[in-house]
Image (cartoon, helix red, strand yellow):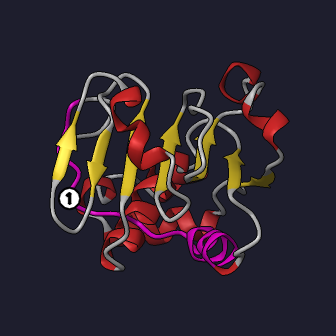
Amino acid sequence: KDDFGSNISTLFIRDCYLHLSEIIFGNVNIFRWRITGNPGIGKTFLGYYLLYQLAKQNRTIIYHQNGRSPILFSDKKVLTTNDTYNFRDYLGREEVWYIVDALEPMQCRAKTILVCSPQKKYYKMFDQLGIDIRYMPVWSLAELNLCRDNIRLFQHLTQKTVRE
């Protein structure tokens, strides 16, 4: 469900999602990333896209979104808990991926991806651990139109509304 409680059935994959995933998955020497940018540019959906890509590879992932319970995805099970600390055994493994959306991640050995707005409360301590920071670009008019043309949820929007 999205932030408004609606079911999400389609994920519009921006070009920057492909580029950022290549950077993250292609670099074996970096274990922590912070992906940041303006509100509303798709950081949460980038997190969903990365989760999807890792799940296709049968990787173990802990996904934790602000305001929701953390979820453990593995090839054998899916678990949820009220406290990320309950997943500490998994978070202690370098082969595990930890995707965090809009909250301060736990310090751990798992490969950590923090997607958040540029508010220091989300990353102040995390940045001290030695990370790679990437900035998501704002939507281009071409991306907005492509999304409007291909996703039914947005097809009612006029060109004028999209430009505004």
**Which residue is at the front of the view, 13 or 29?**
29
Span shown in magenta: 5-25
Q: Amino acid at mark 1?
A: Ser
For label 1, the residue is 9
x and y percentages locating residue 140 in the rendered image: 66, 63
Tally of numbered discs: 1
The reply, left or right, for residue 14 in relation to residue 87 is right
Q: Measuring 50% from the left and 65% from the top, which residue is drawn there? A: 95
x and y percentages locating residue 52 in the rendered image: 35, 67
Q: Measuring 59% from the left and 41% from the top, which residue is drawn there? A: 108
Q: Measuring 65% from the left and 69% from the top, which residue is drawn there? A: 24
Q: Answer above or below: position of 19 versus 102.
A: below
For the question of whether residue 164 can be seen, the reply is: no
x and y percentages locating residue 5 in the rendered image: 21, 31
Residue 116: name its quadrant. top right
x and y percentages locating residue 33 in the rendered image: 70, 53
Question: Which quadrant would the N terminus be assigned to in this image?
Answer: top left
Query: Magenta stretch containing residue 109, yes or no?
Result: no
For the question of whether residue 29 can be seen, the reply is: yes
Q: Answer above or below: position of 43 versus 117.
A: below
The reply, left or right, for residue 141 in relation to residue 75 is right
**Which residue is at the front of the view, 156 or 88?**
88
SS at circle 1: loop
